[in-house]
Amino acid sequence: MNTKSLHFILTLSCGLFLLSSCGNTQEKCELDEKILDVPIDLSIVRLEKQFYTASTEEEFLFLLEEYPDFAKDYLEVELYESKEQLAQELMFINQDTLMQELYAEVQENYPDLNQLDQDLSHAFAYIKYHFPDFNTPKVYTFLTGFSNDLYISDEMIVIGLDYFLPKEHEFQPTDLPRYISDRYDREYIVPMVVTAISSKYNKVDPKQNTLLAEMIFYGKAYHFTKSILPCTADDFIIGYTSEEVVACFANEEFIWSHFIENDLLYETNPFEIRKYTGEAPATDVISQDAPGRVGRWLGWNIVDDYRFNNDISLDELMEMEDVEKLFRQSGYKPRQ
């Protein structure tokens, strides 16, 4: 074991101690009632129930007519010779034994969507409060056969509920490594949706292609999500375990020194950048025990400090494209 790994493991032990002493802080959080009063018209439509109980071509054709946005943008009906051809393919999928088993499991694990409806309504109210131009999209749930976890546009959101079965469930997406599939649980649905929506407001300068620019982009995305979901634990926003979050804070000075000593902030090589912000089980160039995407986590801290140390609203933050100015004015220093 190298020295870097040993250092990270030792401070992970300290992190676990910190976690046990502050694990209940999230329970004390309260949402802003003034923001929750922002009117939001949300109704989640469970399309998996309608499509997986249909049995005739006529019923499928009716559904395609009833939900034209879903048929056009999600099912991509225009790629088929006719709606009848798409209806026949949907019938074939519907009759598959494994798909019916998967549908039954989704219904058992999601007998209702009351909590999801409430959480999305609160999130949309917060977004509308900070960004008055936000319009509540239509929200559908569906059974995708592990082909699409989330579809998000300004007008429509489709949630593939099969992706969000319990992580120990026998049905799991086969094309994802475990360190990614572990994030696909019900607690992650709303943070994933909000983070995706953040891209609409997250302005960037395309000429800035440094590691710092990518760190700040993700930092703004996570800061947006935390601002919209203030009572959601960091774990569900960045996709780390609680232990990894606390260990990262315990090792923040160690992580930051790696970036500074190796002159990484203005690195432009995409292969080098990916080592620190790309999906991976670990950021092993720092330590085999450092979680992957640690550059994104560090960018989040920089953005948090910038917002804390400057009188700036969330919409102004998201509009800011000057990465260098944001970094300089953040006053960022690793937590002690």
Image (spheres, rainbow, N blue to C red):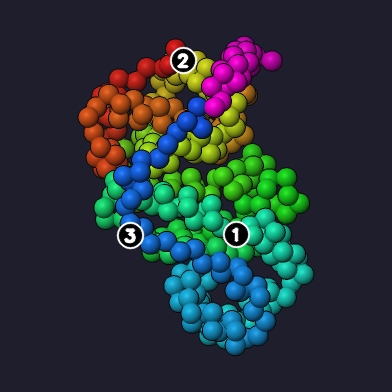
- Marks 3 and 2, how far apart at CA: 41 Å
User: Is the residue marked by circle 2 packed among few (<14), some (14-19), or many (20+) residues within 10 Å?
Assistant: some
The mark that comes first in sequence, 3 or 1, is: 1
Q: Which quarter of the figure has residue 59?
A: bottom right
Q: Is residue 264 magenta?
A: no
In this view of the protein, can residue 276 be seen by the observer?
no
User: At x 42% / y 24%, what residue is drawn?
Assistant: 264
User: Is the residue marked by circle 1 packed among few (<14), some (14-19), or many (20+) residues within 10 Å?
Assistant: few
Give the prevailing secondary structure in the magenta stretch: helix
Residue identifier under label 3: 135
**Amino acid type at mark 3:** Asn
What's the mark number on residue 74?
Answer: none
User: At which x and y percent is residue 33?
Assistant: 35, 43
Q: Which quarter of the figure has residue 319?
A: top left
**Which part of the image, by quadrant, shows the C terminus?**
top left
User: At x 32% / y 52%, what residue is drawn?
Assistant: 38
State whether residue 147 is above or below residue 91: above
Q: Is residue 16 magenta?
A: yes
What's the mark number on residue 253?
Answer: 2
- Secondary structure beneath disc 2? helix
Q: Which residues are magenta?
A: 1-24
State whether residue 223 is above or below residue 256: below
The nearer-to-camera label among 2 and 1 is 1
**Amino acid type at mark 2:** Glu
